[in-house]
Image: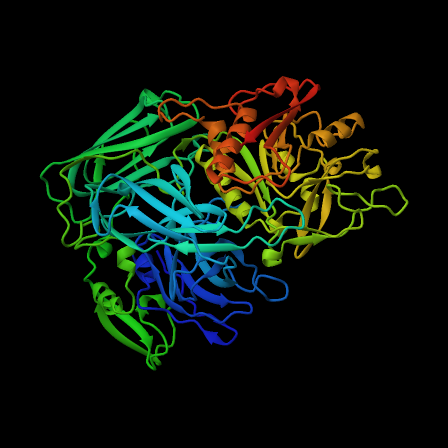
Amino acid sequence: MGCAPLRFLRENNRPIEMNPHMQTARHAIIGAAAFGLALAMSVPAQTNPQFTSVSATDEGAIRLAWASQSNEVYEIDEADALGTNANGSTAWNLLYEDYPSQGANTFWLDTGNYTFVPIIPHPKYAPMRFYRIVDKGPDTASDEPSAAIISPGTNAVVSGELTIMVVASTDQPFLAGTQLYVDGQAMKMADSTTNYSNGSINYELDTYTINTCEWGNGTHILFATVMCQSANAVTINAPPVCTGHGVSAFIPVTFNNLVTRISFSQPSFDPSSGQIQQVSAIFVSNSDWTLNIVDINSNLVLAATGSGGSMSYNWDGTGKSGTNLPNGIYYYYITAQTNGLALPPNISSTNNGGGSPPSPGFTMSSSLAGPDAIELWAMPADGSGAAVPLILYPPGFDTNELLIFSASFSQMMLQSESASTFTANEGASGGDSPDGAGSGAPAPPSAQSTPPAPQRPPNNPVRGLQGTFGVGCDSYTANGTNGITLGPLLDGSGLGTHIQFEGHGGTAYLNYEAMALSKFGASAFASQMQGWGWTNAIYKVDDQLSINDLTGSGSPFNNVNLVLLLLHGTYGTSIDYAANGCKQMYFPITSGGGGQYLRMSQMNFGGSGANGLKWIGIYACYSLYHVNWSSMKNAGVKPYNSNLHLLLGSDAACYPSLTFGTYWAKYMNYGTSTNAASPNPLTIRAAWYQAARDAYKMYKVSLPDGASSAVMAVAGDAACMDDTLQTNYSPMGNWTYDNNPVWP
């Protein structure tokens, strides 16, 4: 496969340098993908940082490192091409947000972002990727939180399933949660969370589980981040909500497995669209192997066997003897036993299983297996840039000003080690071979049964797609921690009078706090739904979400089955004559640093057909305030049409939460069972209530002055109140209302 030319980009007349760590050529040479790489820095009102290294792992992920300032937060953007706008500027896509500084030097790994719509694929699938790092400025909390990985210990040698325990603490009122990274790649949310307090200090203990067989053997770096807030953003005209971030120490851990690099060709597998799921793995020694595919109830649906130094099995989604299987969750288990045979020069395998035959070409190139091969490198003769493989320069390139020399890849890595304590090699595979255990580690086991896979993002253990969903979120952060202030709203009487919100005077300007946490909650919900086989069809955050997206029957959200909106909400304490003379609910929707109110009466949710909207949750304060809901009902004002089954919301103040959406998705798809083999999905209504109970309990939220409890609510067609995602009923036209206290 040919290699796209490497392009050096100048922005604001500042050259961007490449570091000798860069393995882009290596990646392209072995034929896994071909791409060019260019970088840009954009730092509004901040000191310009500088890249310190750019490298590619042997999996094709791009590792960026830059000189940073302590206690600052960064945004990482990407573009597939430059100068795409009419005025010659570049349309950047958000790739990752609010990434905390790691001190004087910060690194991050690009493995794509599969929760966005459209998705940003893994760099190995991209022909070209440009990056921009935006310094969003320092944290605003008075004290930073702390995080530490307490298990495993530094330099531990591990195999199979690894449990990682992270403890975080803060003296701020709100500990927002941790995020685990492996080699800079963000993992899925914690499996379990425990919160507790000791005086003025709040603590959180999170437990994560990963399958180490999904990485290569060798040294890998674990670290965790944590976020805290000074308050919950629920009160109108409250002081700004300040945020802080912390990063744990880096913990090097050696993965030591017989079965390594378990991978999947499809992040979410849909055989109805003709997809084939290729399950691949590499063995440290020539092995006899078995692949078992098991459903969520631990039933074996298919087995395949083979031998060799690697395996590649193409599953067409059918069971034994080609039987049809239902859509759902399926896990992959690999068992291997060394057979005493030597590994072939090019790692390969035979396949004796059922189903579709394997692709003929699952091999590992000898160029990757032999890191000491000598090749030509080039760098500017004046020393102004880093050395890169000569093959990156396109044919015909003028090399007169280049210094060209020969060296092995490992020699270049050794040369660069002194410049960084974390080299590209540490993020890939250590040792003397692509999957060696690394010097000092014991030999990998001679027999191994792996944990269930996949667990590593972005792969999901699904067969078939369950339906479609959408996410809308407004974080009110365009003005930093100041939130957004909206002016009075005319009440439609023609008398020049205004709506009174929550008893405030009609002419008052009201401030709605920034809710940075909502964006992370939206992403967590999307990731969880994708993990259960749902397709993310709409994902709109901040300025992507316009007031027109939420009004009328033409709303794009009416074209998906399930929607979650995360917004501020309020209720009117005076009559709205623009809505048939009732009291109703309102939602501030931003546009840049400004915004406007969305009346609930402007909504018309519900869609017909297989992909039509059936259920929508509005996670916002007072989104279903019972007094005003009754007023709307009595006035004949309906924010829904005959196609909608349920409208879920809050009958009181609603607290920003990192975990609410995750719980709601899990409980609807799986239930609350702790037995992995015994799923028992809750109804959509019951899941809404239980998700709020667990989210509020975890954060031990304090209620606003005068409030006795937090109350969630569900309004819906009486025939649909017990809908589940798996079984639902046709609306009959008779709507009812239900609410439940969820805290304390």
The image quadrant that residue 671 belongs to is top left
Q: How is the image coloured?
A: rainbow
Q: Nearer the viewer, residue 474 or 694?
A: 694
| 470 or 394: nearer the viewer | 470
Instruction: Residue 223: give x, y in percent of width and height.
Output: 34, 52
- In the drawing, does residue 499 fall left or right of residue 126? right
User: Which is more toward the observer, 178 or 110?
Assistant: 178
**Spot occupied by residue 253 in the image (x, y as percentages of width and height):** 24, 50
In the displayed structure, 610 sits above or below 52; it is above
Q: Can residue 345 be seen from the camera position used here? A: yes
Q: Residue furthest right?
A: 495
Position of residue 31 in the picture relative to residue 367 (left or right): right
Residue 210: quadrant of the picture: top left
Taking the view exactly as shown, the residue that stands out farthest to the front is 199
Image quadrant where one finds the N terminus: bottom left
In the image as oriented, which residue stretches furthest toward the left?
340
* Residue located at (73% from left, 41% from top): 502
Q: Nearer the viewer, residue 217 or 677?
A: 677
Q: Is residue 262 in sight in this rendering?
A: no
Where residue 469 sits in the image (x, y, percent)? Answer: 55, 35
- Residue depicted at x 48% and y 40%: 699
- Note whether 375 is above or below 467 in the view shown: below
Q: Residue 697's x, y, as percent?
A: 48, 35
Q: Residue at horizontal 63%, vertical 54%?
A: 483
At 51% from the left and 23% from the top, the residue drawn is 726
